[in-house]
Amino acid sequence: MKRQLTGLLLLAAAAGYAHAQSDVYLCVDEHGKKEYKNTGATKGCKKVDLPGITMIPAPPRKPAVQAASKPASSPSDFPKVDSGTQKARDSDRKQILLDEMKGEEQKLANLKKEFNNGEPERHGDERNYAKYQERVAAMKEDIERTEKNIEALKREINNLK
């Protein structure tokens, strides 16, 4: 109910001052469904007292050029990492990415083998040709997604160098 009331208040604010001052009624039908209306002529409607809406202007914003011109600085107590530790971390990260890429390449090889150049074997439960076509389309999407994953991993590995 609060969500509906909040939505109603926002709608009233957007509609303008004249509409915001109109009456709002909460109507409940025979099934207990609540609905907000701007007329109370329907049976089961009661007027809702809403607080007045005031418009508060937003504070002035700084231009983006000023914010971008300042160099980024770390706090003085921000932990520093020596170059040896960072190189070890980069090496570990690269190995993780290489292992992940190897797994994706193996997955791609298996998918392509099963895909069989667009003519995979039909399963016994695929008497309906549409079911077979759905599976083939899903296989093709899996292959494309895996190829994109491999490309992204290659880009990430190249960025480490």
Image: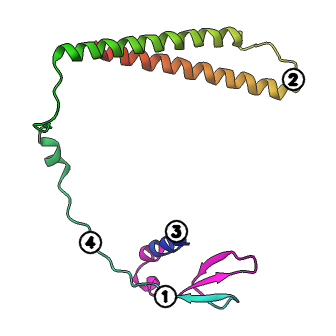
* Residue linked to disc 3: 3
Q: How is the image coloured?
A: rainbow
Q: CA distance from mark 4 to mark 3?
A: 24 Å
Q: Mark 1 Cα within 10 Å, few/some/many (few <14, many 20+)?
A: few
Q: Which residues are magenta?
A: 11-39
Nearer the N terminus, badge 4 or badge 2?
A: 4
Nearer the N terminus, badge 2 or badge 3?
A: 3
Q: Position of residue 135 (x, y in %)?
A: 74, 24
Nearer the N terminus, badge 3 or badge 1?
A: 3
Nearer the N terminus, badge 4 or badge 1?
A: 1
Which quadrant would residue 69 be assigned to in this image? top left
* Residue linked to disc 2: 125
Residues marked 4 and 2 touching at CB (< 8 Å):
no
Q: CA distance from mark 4 to mark 1?
A: 25 Å
Q: Amino acid at mark 1?
A: Asp
Q: Identify the residue at image location x=75%, y=28%.
A: 134
Q: CA distance from mark 2 to mark 3?
A: 47 Å
Q: Secondary structure at mark 3?
A: helix
Query: Could you tell me which quadrant the N terminus lies in?
Result: bottom right
Q: Amino acid at mark 4?
A: Pro
Q: Position of residue 151 (x, y in %)?
A: 46, 17
* Residue linked to disc 4: 57
